[in-house]
Image (cartoon, coloured by chain):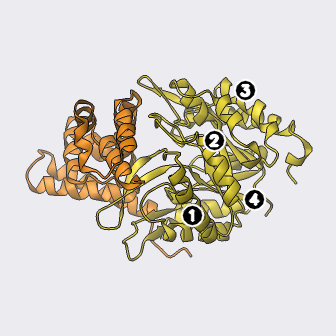
Chain colours: A orange, B yellow
Amino acid sequence: MSLDGFQRALADAVASPSRCLELRRDGSLLETYDLDDRERRRLLAVVGHEGMSHNCTLYRANRLTPLARSLPRTCALLGARLMPELEAFWARKPNTEVQFKLEAERFAHYLSERCNEGAFGVADELAAVLRVELSDLDRQFGLNSHF
Amino acid sequence: MGAATGIGLVFNSIVPHFLAAHVDTVDYVEVIPETLWTDRGRLATRRYEPIPAAFDEVDALAERYPIACHGIGLSIGSASALDEQHLAEIRRFADRYGVDRISEHFGFSRVRGPEGDDHHLGLAFPIPCDNDILSWMIGRIERAMGILGQPIILENGVHHTPLIEQDMTEPEFLNRIAEVTGCGVLLDLHNLHADHRNGGHAPLAYIEALDLEHVREIHIAGGSMIGRTYTDSHAGPCPPEVWDLLVDVAPRCPLLEGITFEFHDSYFPRMGSEGLCQQLQSAREIWAGLPRRHDVT
């Protein structure tokens, strides 16, 4: 059993539609993972299955949801810049953070860095909206010892 | 507080408001404990930060309703080390509310990271139902139940990309695990329906292969289309096929304790309070028709 390699390879494929397409063309790319023959055949069947595109869609939707729900005004202000910035953020932070507050804080930190780089014409407005939404999150999630 | 039997509803931001106005529509509330805290991961020195407002809501519900636990964060099928810290936190949750039914998902949603932490996929995938995986899973489940102090109930997942060349089917795998460990099964009928809608196995074939004596809970829900795929999005009322399955299978589960309706709070406006009441009433009518042993005491 090399379940660890199997799960890593599947996770890498789900996180990257382009990786799936590469694997469909060239199964030898799986050689970097510790897999037995059956696991290799399984993975190639999975990435070649039509349901894989849905897995990739769900993966991206589940990365977007914490930000859309936690930082709605920030997302709205970014407008058409949102998706390119998300793609860049996900490239820098490939590991999914399923905790809404933590993911919102990570994205806010990324955007602050981008503001400092002069990436946005609305940097002052963006910084102000981020401050308000992070403050709202702190109130919503609260921090105290409840036990 | 009594046992979580009868008709239940999965907790979300709408549920406290709904139940304030419709008190007797459910017998228990099922809570996803991971929504009550922020989890900073295995390597954090102070890993779990409770969300006070969420605990306040569950505390208030627990004064009137039994609480069941429906975990989403354990990832029992991950190749990474069993997350014993997480199990201990679930145990604390269960002790706090007197929970007598703890369910989790059969599959994996995390992979081992390079520094001992986990990489979250954000969605669950099936594990291969092979002989060597079976013995490994049995060991993990037994350890998990030891920490929880009670049997765990495993839920069948959705399979958008089925696995080939498995040694046994998933129901056979679940039967074997349940026989050896004493764990139970949470049969999610909408997940079976979703698989079928997407070209997968027939729900009744899965049900016939499953030993229904292990089923302690049934989930029902609605779904929606994303592109060409039918998803288990909990997007509103159950489709007719799920009701038909429930009518068929519930009487054949001798140890069934509850039927739980799941909906995502963002879809509530589509259904409204009246629509939610109708779903719960339909489930209750089916429950009421079950053999006497199913009655709420």
In percent of width and height, residue B62 lies at: 70, 61
Q: Which mark is residue B171?
A: 2
In percent of width and height, residue B182 lies at: 70, 59
Q: Subunit of mark 1?
A: B
Question: From the viewer's perspective, is the residue at label 3 or at label 2 nearer?
Answer: 2
SS assignment at label 1: helix
Alpha carbon separation for disc pair 4 and 2: 36 Å
SS assignment at label 3: helix
Mark 4 or mark 2, earlier in chain: 4
Along the line of sight, the residue nearer the viewer: B142 or B155: B142
Q: Residues within 10 Å of mark 3 (few under 14, many from 20)?
A: few
Along the line of sight, the residue nearer the viewer: B83 or B79: B79
Alpha carbon separation for disc pair 3 and 2: 20 Å
Q: Which residue is mark 4?
A: B64
Q: Classify residue A13 as left or right of residue B108.
A: left
Q: Are marks 4 and 2 on the same chain?
A: yes
Q: Is residue A79 above or below residue A31?
A: above
Q: Which mark is residue B244?
A: 3
Mark 3 or mark 1, earlier in chain: 1
Mark 2 or mark 1, earlier in chain: 1
Which residue extends farthest right?
B292
Q: Residue at x 32, y 61 (%)?
A: B113
Q: Amino acid at mark 2?
A: Pro
Q: Subunit of mark 3?
A: B
Q: Which mark is residue B139?
A: 1
